[in-house]
Amino acid sequence: MLKIIIVDDEANVREAIGQMLKLFSEDTQLIGSYSNIAAAVKAIREDKPHIVLLDIEIGQDNGFDVLKHFPNPGFKVIFITGYQQYAVQAFRFAALDYLLKPVDPDQLSDAIKKAFDAVDREKFSLKIDSFIHNMGSMAHKAKKIVLRTADNMHIVNLNDIMYCESERSYTTFFMADKTKVMVSQTLGDYEDMFNDYGFMRIHKSYLINLQFIKRYEKGDGGTVILNGNISLPVATRKKEQLMELLAKL
């Protein structure tokens, strides 16, 4: 039985989520619903929930203040947010589970079901640090992303990624220091995340960091040469877009 706590200062949100949870299987139980941090911290300590649905903004407080009391939480956190798009990107970069307001029942159900698919609580603080870093850096500077493999969790600066290569449903990251990291996520997922940060999908198999381009060699689609004389093909349909982006560098 998964014990669940809701922490949100909006009564209508707590009520709506509570009703949604009742529709799920008998394997879940809502054991508490709280509107402030002090009550939430007390309940977590006493009731030891498996999952905490945690709002980011709780009145004048920050939901992350709850986690300051639990540096190594023994529970899964699913954040609830009404934040702007840039903050949603920060959640994705940090590989944190989140739900957008108004909460969709199907998305809530999916989040609950996968809550313990990948238990990495000992590394949760790394994800939080990455999220806070990205929120503080804003715009396009010093972004970090969490890359999770079967055995490790890598915290990587976007500026250190030279290019990414697609291998079926996997993506391999090639770093400036010549290290590689393979994750079980598609290249399309990262194309969407990196689109505003100086990256371009030049080919179905390659997403590159434009700052590492040394030169472009003409051809049907052409070829880009990255630092270290790494040669990657450019799809014909991507050539014009690449030329436009290079002209702005």
Image (spheres, rainbow, N blue to C red):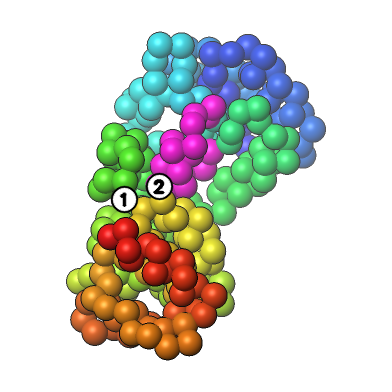
> Could you tell me which quadrant the N terminus lies in?
top right
Q: Residue 64: x and y, percent? A: 38, 27
* Residue drawn at the location 50% of the way across and 79% of the way down: 235
Q: Residues within 10 Å of mark 1 (few under 14, many from 20)?
A: many
* Amino acid at dot 1: Lys
Quadrant of the rendered structure where residue 87 is?
top left
Task: Identify the residue position indicated by label 2 in the image.
Answer: 94
The spot of residue 110 in percent (x, y) is 67, 45
- Left or right of 112: which side holds 221? left
Secondary structure of the residue carrying numbered label 1: strand
x%, y% of residue 157?
Answer: 27, 55
Q: Give the residues drawn in magenta, as a range.
A: 81-98
Q: Which residue is mark 1?
A: 144
Name the residue located 33 percent from the left edge and 84 percent from the top edge. 217
Instruction: Give the amino acid at mark 2.
Output: Ala
Say if mark 2 contacts mark 1, CB within 8 Å: yes
